[in-house]
Structure formats: structure tokens, C-alpha cells
Amino acid sequence: MGAYYYLMAQLPSLVYDQKPPMSSDDFKALAKTLLNKEDATLLEHLSIDPDPQAGEGPAYAENAQPTGCSFIDGWREWERTFRLNLSRQRAVHLKREGSNTVEPPFVPADAAVAASKAVIGDSSPLEAEILVDKARWNAIEGLESNVYFHRNNIFAYFLKLLLLERRQAFNTDRGFSEYKSLYAEIVDSAHQSLGEPK
């Protein structure tokens, strides 16, 4: 476990909504040099998707195969529960009668609550995605080990980096959209001040 201590001790702390201090790929490359073979394999298959190995169709329709790691299995179950509840809530919200969705589990309860908030809230699609990722962040923190240098915390760090990268992409998209809007206003204003037609 000395290698795990060394890995976690050198990592900067992560705060939700901050710029990621490194890419998830860089972290994975570093971690794989220090993790034992089993944990390195588990890290390779860890993602925001509840079952990235499922192939075609929704990867959350059925329970993912257990990995033997309580953190990863707990994470997959949380994300699966969230996605199933989100699908069901959206079908109800959009009044899609007879929608063929899988019956969502009620546990973990915070996943079901997060799905309801994402659908029912008055937020924009971007705000809903941010709300969802914050719920994911909290779920990850709930699954972490009390022992900071445990493998679960290494896995949690990786998932948090994925969420920060996802959030960074939202910020980039939003920034570009705001830039285009501002640019259009400036051009419009310039045309008006010069008395030119739009």
C-alpha cells in the first residue's frame, strides 16, 4: 500500500466546479504505474457509464456484472438507479403513455431524488446537467473510503476528474454561445451607429 499512499499524497485536491488539475487520461497513466494488477484493471473499466462493457443499447437496462470492488459496484448501482429514474421521470413529465422503460429501483434514494430534480426543476438543460453532476459528485464522495490512501479513493479521484472534464466542456460550450451572442450584438450595434441596414 506504500505506492497508493505515494499516489494519493502527491495529488492536488479536487473541488467541484474547478478546472481539472490534470486530465483523466494523465491520471490513469500515472495511477496504473502504481496500482497492483487487479486495481489497474478495475481502473481501466471505470467510467460514468454504469456498465461500459454492455455494448449496444442502454448500458443500464440490467444490473452490471459485479466487479468485486464495493466502490465500483456501488457507483454503478447509483448511476444505474439514477438513469432509470431519470428515464421514467422524463416519460411521465412528457406524458409518454406506455413508455417501455425498465422499472427503476428506489435505492439508492439520493439517485432517485437527483433524477426527479433534473426533470421537474425550472432549470435550463445546462443547469439540469450541472445539478446532475453535482449529485454524482456527492454520490462519489459518499462511496469513498474513510482511509484516504485506499483504492476506493483512487477510483473516486478518477471519476471526479471525469466529472470536472465534463463540466469544463459545458463551460466551453456556454462560453462559445455567449461569445457568439455578444459578437452579434456588437455587429448589430455597429451597423445601427453607422446607419447601415442589418
Image (cartoon, rainbow, N blue to C red):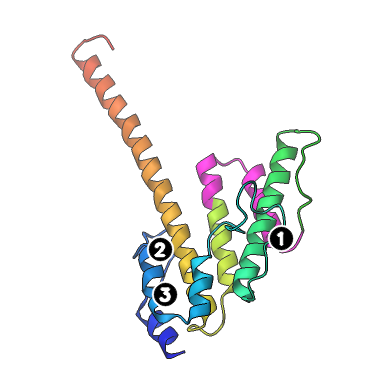
Q: Main secondary structure of the magenta part?
A: helix
Q: Which mark is residue 63?
A: 1
- Determine whether, in the image, residue 131 is placed left or right of residue 5: right
- As drawn, 19 above or below 156: above
Residues at circles 2 and 1 in contact by the CB criterion of under 8 Å: no
Q: Secondary structure at mark 1?
A: loop
Boundaries of the magenta span: 106-130
Q: Label 1 amino acid?
A: Asn
Q: Label 3 amino acid?
A: Lys
Percent coordinates x, y for residue 43 in the rendering: 50, 70
Q: Earlier in the sequence, mark 1 or mark 3?
A: 3
Front tag of 3 and 2: 3
Q: Which residue is mark 3?
A: 32
Q: Label 2 amino acid?
A: Ser
Q: Which residue is mark 2?
A: 24
Quarter in which the C terminus is drawn: top left
Q: Secondary structure at mark 2?
A: helix
